[in-house]
Amino acid sequence: MKIKDIIIYPVKGMAGISVPSAMTTNRGFQHDRTWMLVNAEGKFITQREYASMALFKTKIDSSELVVEFEGDEISIPLVPSNSSKQRVKVWRHIFDATLVSDHVDQWFSNKLNMECRMVYMGPDDKRHKSLIKAPRKTELSFADGYPYLIIGTASFDGLQSKLEEPIAINRFRANIIIETTDPHCEERWDFIEVGGAVLKMIKPCARCPVVNINQETGESTKSVLKTLSTYRKMSSKVYFGMNTVSIEDGEIKVGDFVLVNGR
């Protein structure tokens, strides 16, 4: 098996970027979910509430994050000059994050037609996640629940065969896509070695209605989650992909061979 694609999502809820290689860290890939929009109460906002967030395209150069929306764009320094903090909430986690700037806040507020602020997770901003198995604890970015999400191509192909119309795999917002031949084999792995990294598989990923959103148009239908629920539903939740943490950091490249469970 080989790595087919590596994707980072600089701003939580916005479009991702396919990259040829990436360094793993305890929090996730560098720059992955490092920025986030929050409402006036500090609660995170995503495509669940604002499907149009899928249409915000992102790119990173040596010194800036650039976000583009409907022909307009804004450049954001990779490290904010601001040191002011905002108390934020992502699901049950409440922690401090760094405010970016009033100018950036206003730009996103205008685009989304709502009051919002952009926050940044700097090296001193900490969020921790307890795990159901070793290593029992990990740091975490602004991601929903785990630093990495892995999907095998055979799992996606199996879903495609059940849908009336084809979809793109980017609906599932994976970080690592692995070429596989056995659907959902990633759920049976304990750990993988790839490049210089070792990743530990923790639990299958419970899916939300975001998988119904076309990431190119922002339009939503119920067909994807409905189809998945016919064969991937367990205890009232629908699972697809594998939540993962890094236990040994290293560089992963597209095309790298994947070693499963030390074999």
Image: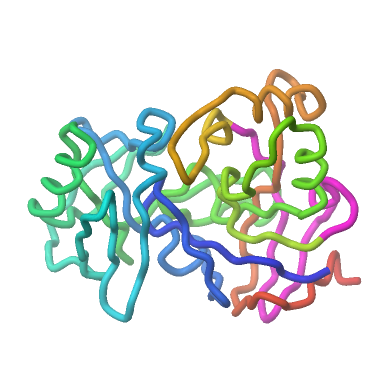
Q: Is residue 97 above or below residue 218?
A: below
Q: Quadrant of residue 159?
A: top right
Magenta stretch: give its range: 180-207
Instruction: Locate residue 88, reporting x and y percent.
Output: 28, 40
Q: Nearer the viewer, residue 96 or 168?
A: 168
Residue name at image x 17 percent, y 57 percent:
100
Colouring: rainbow
Residue name at image x 63 percent, y 51 percent:
136
Instruction: Locate residue 52, reporting x and y percent.
Output: 36, 37
Q: Quadrant of residue 252?
A: bottom right
Image quarter of the C terminus: bottom right
Residue most toward the left?
A: 102
Residue name at image x 64 percent, y 78 percent:
253
151 left or right, relative to 43: right
257 left or right, relative to 82: right
Image quarter of the N terminus: bottom right
Q: Nearer the viewer, residue 135 or 151?
A: 151
190 left or right, relative to 83: right
Instruction: Locate residue 102, reporting x and y percent.
Output: 8, 51
Instruction: Locate residue 117, reporting x and y percent.
Output: 19, 44
Q: Is residue 24 above or below residue 221?
A: below
255 within the magenta span: no
Residue name at image x 28 percent, y 44 percent:
37
Q: Nearer the viewer, residue 171 or 235?
A: 171
